Image (cartoon, rainbow, N blue to C red):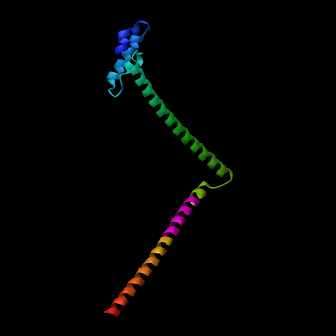
Amino acid sequence: MSDAAASGFGKFVPGFDFLQNLAKGASQSIPQMPNLANWVAPSLNLEELEKRIEELKAVHFWLEQNSKALGATIQALEVQKMTLAALKGMNFNIGDVANAFKLKAADSVAQSVQRVTEKAESAAKTISSAATSVGNAAKAAG
């Protein structure tokens, strides 16, 4: 509390000493907290003010980003809610809609597996045929 104590700022603001002591007590009881007394008291040191401004700008940016993410989440949930309400209004069974998406996904996976199996079978036949040809050529030469 270098600048505030030296400038005697407490003389001009009633209750400032109480607030300063309260902040000191809070920072001593919670070791993870920064020295709150330094944040309560005004500073006359330009470097310290710049440091405080940069720290507060970083906190402000972080809060803004979290606020935007929270807003986007709320908006997505509202869209989901409206979609479900619209589907219910059209007498769609929500369970059937969910199953339709699951079935399409399962069908596409099954089709992909079948294609891969067919390609592997074709490759195996080609390799087997080539091996047979090489074996026959080796027997004829031997």
| Nearer the observer, 39 or 27 | 39
Please report the bounds of the magenta region as a residue range: 100-113
**142 on left or right of 101:** left
Can you give x and y, in whole percent of width and height, for residue 30 in the image? 34, 25
Q: Is residue 100 above or below residue 40?
A: below
Q: Would you say 123 lies left or right of 142 here?
A: right
The quarter of the displayed image where residue 100 is located: bottom right
> Outermost residue, left direction?
142
Query: Who's the residue at 43% across and 7% down the image?
Result: 12
| 109 falls in the magenta region | yes
Number of on-image labels: 0
Above or below — where is 65 with respect to 88?
A: above
| Furthest residue toward right | 90
Q: Position of residue 95 (x, y in %)?
A: 58, 56
- Where does the image place residue 89, in percent across and percent down from the top left? 68, 50
Quadrant of the image occupied by residue 55:
top left
Q: Residue at x 52, y 64 (%)?
A: 106
Residue 74 or residue 9, whichever sits in front? 9
Q: Nearer the viewer, residue 88 or 100?
A: 100
Task: Residue lying at the far top in this picture: please name it.
Answer: 11
Quadrant where the C terminus lies?
bottom left
Image point (66%, 49%), residue name: 86
Is residue 60 depicted above or below 108 in this figure?
above
Residue displayed at 41% across by 6% down: 11
In the rendered image, the residue lying farthest to the front is 141
Q: Is residue 4 magenta?
A: no
Task: Give the answer, above or below, for where 102 lies relative to 33.
Answer: below
Q: Quadrant of the N terminus?
A: top left
> For the stretch drawn in magenta, what is the main secondary structure?
helix
- Residue 109 located left or right of residue 52: right
Residue 82: image location, x then y, percent: 63, 46
